[in-house]
Image (spheres, helix red, strand yellow):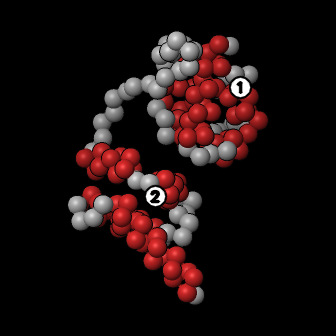
Amino acid sequence: MANAKKVGTLIKKARTDAGLTQEQLARKVKGASASDIGRAERGEKELTQEQLKQVAKATGVTQKSLLDAAKGSGGKTSGTGKTSAATSTIKVTATEKRLVELYRKADSQTRQNALKLLRGSGAGEIAAGDILSGVLNAITGKRSMPDEVQRNSEESASQTTEE
């Protein structure tokens, strides 16, 4: 059960970092309820490998980190007993690398809006086209994404108040 607690800690961290509730995550994991997710996070239930893969996909963590933790072979621990971030190598395109760089430079609100758009849950007051335009402009070097998205956000907000 020690591995189950370790996996549970990783699942909870991945879920909260992705901004998902247990119920939202459960909807993305076949055969799991919100109660099952909660029990797994507490180390009281072991998810199947297929469910761990679905958790990884839904939360944006590597499948390897969850599967290794489940097998008891991954995740280094520090002297405090806390699991440190797993390191892995993944091939990305130049565009994907640029998106990660821009995401890391973006302010909190821009990050939240971008994640909402990518998850398909809408981007609040920012239109999808505005964000995509900002991303494309940033990739092509016309303007930095945070400035472009901020400008579009301000325009969108002022249009809403004028109506």
Q: Is residue 126 visible?
A: yes
Task: State which quarter of the image contains the N terminus.
Answer: top right
At a point 27% along the width and 64% down the height, the residue shown is 143
Report the mark closest to the observer, 2 or 1. 2
Q: Which mark is residue 59?
A: none
> In terms of secondary structure, where does tag 1 sit?
loop
Q: Is residue 99 above or below residue 73?
A: below
Taking depth in this image into account, of 122 and 31 the one nearest to the observer is 122
Q: Which residue lies furthest to the bottom in this view?
A: 163
Q: Which amino acid does label 1 sit on?
A: Arg
Determine which residue is flagged by label 1: 42
Q: Which amino acid does label 2 sit on?
A: Thr
At a point 57% along the width and 59% down the height, the residue shown is 121
Task: State which quarter of the image contains the C terminus.
Answer: bottom right
Taking depth in this image into account, of 108 and 90 the one nearest to the observer is 108
- The Cα–Cα distance between marks 2 and 1, rounded to whole angstroms, is 32 Å
* Quadrant in the rendering for residue 149: bottom left
Tell me residue 95's x, y (percent).
28, 50
Q: Is residue 47 left or right of residue 99?
A: right
Sooner in the amino-acid sequence: mark 2 or mark 1: 1
Q: Which residue lies furthest to the right in this view?
A: 35
Q: Is residue 89 left or right of residue 111?
A: left
Q: Is residue 129 visible?
A: no
At a point 38% along the width and 46% down the height, the residue shown is 104
Determine which residue is flagged by label 2: 110
Tell me residue 37's x, y (percent).
70, 34
Q: In this view, does 64 lie to the left or right of 10?
A: left
Tell me residue 139's x, y (percent).
27, 58
> In terms of secondary structure, where does tag 2 sit?
helix
At a point 51% along the width and 82% down the height, the residue shown is 159
Tell me residue 126's x, y (percent).
49, 69
Q: Is residue 155 above or below residue 144?
A: below
